Image (tube, helix red, strand yellow):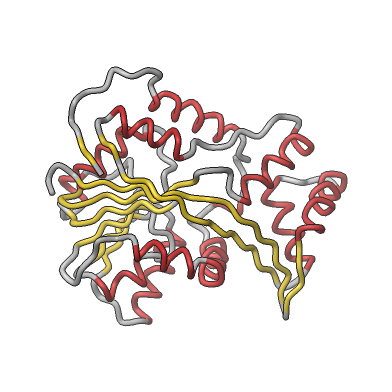
Amino acid sequence: MSRSREPSCLNPDWNEIWKKRQKLHESSKLSDDPTHNWNKRENAERYDLNSHNEYDDRVKTTLAGLDIGKNSRVLDIGSGPGTLAIPLSPLVKEITAVEPGAGMVEILRKHAEREGLRNITCVQKTWEEIDLSLDLPTPFDIVIASLSLTMYDIREALQKMDAASSGSVHLFWFVDMPFWERMYADLWEPLHGSPYHAGPKTDCLFGVLYQMGIYPDVTMLPLAKEYRFGSREEMFGFFHKRFGAGTPEEQKVVDEYVTPLMRTEVNAVVISGNSTFAHVRWRTTQS
C-alpha cells in the first residue's frame, strides 16, 4: 500500500462520474418505496433479521481484515442495526456509530443493552451532516464504511473520512451489481417503462481515491444476499412493494420473475444470490 499527496491531473474526473451515476441511480428509485425507509422499525427489524441469517461470513471476513486492538477507537459510518458495531464492541475500546435511520438506531441500542455493551455511542445523522469538530470525538484509530457509500459527493465524503482517522480507513463496496440490484435491472423496464441505472461501483471509487492521491490496497470478497419469508404470500407482498407493482398485471410480472428464484426451507421461503464486493483500505497521513 502506498500513499501520495501529489495532485493528480488525470482525466476524466471520477468524482463527477460518481455524481452522474449516483444521480441516475436515484432516478431509478421509487420516491414512495416503503421498504427502504430505515426510520421505520419494521424495515429495520427485517434488515436485522436477514443480517443475522446471511451476514455471519461477511462479518467474520470484515473483522479479520481490520487492524484492531483492545485500545482501538472505531468510527462505523452507516452502521445500520449494528451489523459490525455489535460484534466489534468486545474487541475494541469504543465505537461511534453514525446512522441516520431512527429504526436502525433503536435496534442497535437494544442489541447493545441486551448484550451489556456500554462502549457504543450512536450519532443519528447522515455522514454529510456530520461536523467533525462538533459531532465526533476525532481522531479515530479506524474508520469503517461498510456498504454505506451512498453519498452524492464521494470525494468530499472520503476527505472527511480520511481527516477523521489517525490510523486507517476501511471501505467495503460493490464490485459488480449485487443480487438485489440485478433484480431491479431485470424488472424496472417491464414495470416502469424505463431502463434501470445501477449505482457507482468500486472502479469509480478507486478512480476518485487515485485522483485524491490515495493509492489503497484492494481485496475482492464474495458477497451473498438472502431474503427469508414466512410464506409465499409474504414474499410476493414484499416484492410488490419493493418494485412498485401496483396493478394486477404488474404484480403478475413480479410473481413470474421471483417464483423460479425461490426455494422452500423449513418454515421459510428463501431467495438468494451471490456477487462480489471489495475491501478498499489505506493508512492516513496522520498515522
Question: How far from the left and from the top, in percent, is residue 171?
Answer: 36, 49
Residue at 43% from the left image edge and 55% from the top image edge: 101
Question: How far from the left and from the top, in percent, is residue 119?
Answer: 24, 71
Does residue 239 appear left or right of residue 206 in this picture?
A: right
Q: Is residue 5 above or below residue 85?
A: above
Front-most of 31 and 184?
A: 184
Front-most of 271 and 113?
A: 271
Q: Is residue 219 above or below residue 151?
A: below
Viewport quadrant of the N terminus: top left
Residue at 22% from the left image edge and 23% from the top image edge: 7
- Quarter of the view holding residue 84: bottom left
- Quarter of the view holding residue 82: bottom left
Does residue 186 appear left or right of residue 149 in this picture?
A: right
Residue at the left extreme, as displayed: 286
Residue at 39% from the left image edge and 63% from the top image edge: 105
Question: How far from the left and from the top, in percent, is residue 281?
Answer: 31, 48
